Image (cartoon, rainbow, N blue to C red):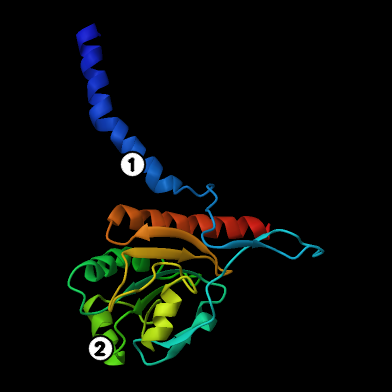
Amino acid sequence: MSKRKQLTFFVLFLIIVLPVIITIFLKTGKNVYRPLPYIGFKYEKAPGDTAYQSIYDTFPDFELTDQAGRKTGAKDLKGKIFAVDFIFTTCPNICPVMTSNLKSVQEEYMNDNDVRMVSISVDPEHDIVDSLASYAKKFDINKDKWFLLTGDRKYIYKLMSEKGFLITRPETPLAHSEIVELIDKEGHIRGQYKGTNPMEIDKLIEDIHALQVAYKKEKK
């Protein structure tokens, strides 16, 4: 083979074959061995404890009402991995984009009982059960996999801020964020993602898988 042909072959490899190999690696590897960080406030157990170690805050106990009119909250998420965001159903910009993107998480883990999804309304006066049910129908949201929640505004804003999921401090009506959080089975925040970015949602899917692999390793 002439040097010119060799060069042509090498260039074609770089342009066509290499990107395919990288894509396959990223899709199949899923970063399963990469430990996820803990996000939030860290404190130490009191001196004298037999298990003296760093502890991170967990999301608080809470109960709200879902799109089916059920009382839903921490008890339903205990021992589950879940993703959570804050939305409102009449939002004209980021919320429908986030919800559409998160559909891929629902599809990926539809038959996985370890995984749940939660979207909490920051406009509870409008987002009553019927409004949430209509929104769920519009986006084909499964009521047993993905909870759309409503309740008292002050209570929800407290959950959203530093007393809860640490997403933002609401200072204006309908204040919300494009952030989606990943919560592990113990209630620790393990990741934050831009819900408007499909690539970030792909990373969320990979990180859920990474948590599942980590839990399986712990059982061995």
Q: Quadrant of residue 26?
A: top left
Quadrant of the image containing the C terminus: bottom right
Q: Earlier in the sequence, mark 2 or mark 1?
A: 1
Q: Can residue 148 be seen in the rendering of this structure?
A: yes
Q: On residue 86, which mark appears?
A: none
Q: Tell me which amino acid carries mark 1.
A: Thr
Local secondary structure at mark 2: loop
Q: Are marks 2 and 1 in contact (CB under 8 Å)?
A: no
Read off the residue under disc 1: 23
Position of residue 210 measured from the top left corner of the image (x, y, whole percent): 50, 54
Q: Tell me which amino acid carries mark 2.
A: His
Mark 1 surroundings within 10 Å by alpha-carbon count, few (fewer than 14), some (14 through 19), many (20 or more): few
What residue is at 31 percent from the left and 71 percent from the top? Answer: 176
Q: Is residue 83 above or below residue 77?
A: above
Position of residue 91 measured from the top left corner of the image (x, y, whole percent): 21, 75
Local secondary structure at mark 1: helix
Q: Is residue 74 above or below residue 58?
A: below
Viewer-nearest residue: 5 or 57: 57
Count up the numbered dots.
Answer: 2
> Residues under labels 2 and 1: Cα distance?
43 Å
Position of residue 214 measured from the top left corner of the image (x, y, whole percent): 58, 56
Read off the residue under disc 2: 126
